[in-house]
Image (tube, grey):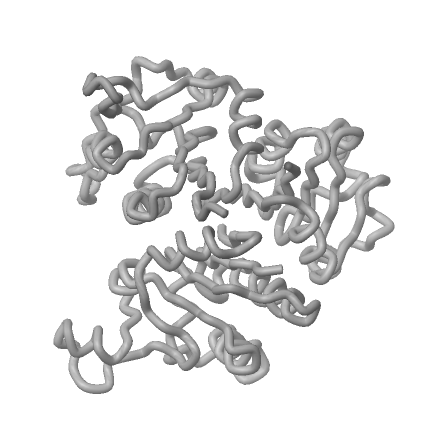
Amino acid sequence: MSTLHTVNKSPFDRGSLESALAHALPGDAVLLIEDAVVGARSAAARIAEVLKAAMPACSLYVLGPDLSARGIPTTDVIDGMTVVDYAGFVDLVTGHDKTQAWL
Amino acid sequence: MSDTKRFLYVNRKAPHGTIYALESLEVVLIGAAFEQDVSLAFLDDGVFQLIKKQATTGIGVKNFAPVYRALGDYDVKKIFVERESLEERGLSEDDLMEITHENDDEEDVSSVEIVDRARMAEIMAAQDVILSF
Amino acid sequence: MKIGVVVNEGPYTHQASDTAYQFTKASLEKGHEIYRVFFYHDGVNNATRLTVPPQDERNVQRNWSELAEKYQLDLVVCIAAAQRRGILDDSEAKRHGKGDGAANLAPGFRISGLGQLIESGIQSDRLVVFGD
């Protein structure tokens, strides 16, 4: 049983990313969408550390169209995070037993 | 083949500032008729939904807190509250309203279980459907 | 795979409905079945036919209506949430005495109870929630 966790709020504004990571189990995936993608930049040291700490256990993804819309090039994204499009989002949903939205 | 699924309603928002707590509760009540395996989780600011003595007349809004206490009548018996979320907010179990249901021996027993974060993560992982609002 | 979608926010203020739309479209294009899209909370506001967004902007309601027509989608608006927010079909408008022509439910949407959300959770292989 693995879970896809979706997070849509900026980690600079809300605690939903950190709460999601605190409840994600090994083998789960976490996908950043909407405003949460601002947390995927490697230059933002504190949040980048939080994400990197989760990485050995969980796979981390970020929605590319949301990055582009916010002017964040994929080259700015934390190493080890995977950029997906909406089709990739669908594959993540079907590839895990369930989806939990951290609204 | 069984149509029974494990449903978890995740509540992470404080009540009254937005309608999510009330309308989530409405889903739980309607959902009870479907005889699924239902649990409720309260974590982060969601723990404030279960605080005793909510008085809403001052803000001109109907107080729906008493509905939580009736959940037992709807066969909703599993209410998990995260210990760390309470502690971070300076709250304890004593601050929460009493929610009970009748067990098989017709005794009123508490429906609320305080669980730590690791246990909450396991509870979430064990579900089939997670509804968050 | 059978996927259920839930939309908890209205159009334009939040991106939730747009993301849900793109996700639903991508699911259908990949050959998955969308069991139902359920609109709850302010999400019911996606279903009013009375929005008039500027010509050069996307029309969120029309996007949903057109997708529903193309793929025979079941777009369900929660009745309790809809009544609170003034989204009415013909029979609801009549029942509440709101006058002729008051119904504002857009094509492709139908109003029904919260049970439809639970049923979507039971019947779908995956349930995906979009909100604030």
What x and y, as percent, mark residue A4? Answer: 64, 43
As drawn, the residue found furthest toward the left would be C97
Q: Quadrant of residue A43?
A: top right
**Residue reaching furthest to the front:** B1
Percent from the top left, x then y, of residue A36? 64, 46
Residue A42 position, x and y percent, is: 80, 39
Left or right: A64 as drawn, with respect to B105 = right
Q: For the point 47% across and 29% down, which residue is it? A: B44
Quadrant for residue C9, please give it: bottom left
Q: Which of the pair C94/A62 is nearer the observer? A: C94
Residue A84 against residue C71 in the figure, above or below: above
How many marks do you count on the picture? 0
Residue at position x 26%, y 21% in the image = B103
- In the picture shown, does residue C132 fall above or below C112? above
Whether residue C109 is visible, yes or no, is yes
Is residue B18 visible in the rendered image? The answer is no
Please name the residue shown 41% across and 55% down the image.
C119
**Residue positioned 66% across, 53% down in the render:** A94
Q: Residue C1 is drawn in which quadrant?
A: bottom right
Task: Please name whichever residue, C4 or C86, is drawn nearer the observer in this view of the structure.
Answer: C4
A98 sits to left or right of A39: left
What x and y, as percent, mark residue C35? 51, 64
In this rendering, the answer to whether A39 lies above or below C13 is above
In this rendering, position of residue B67 left or right of residue C73: left
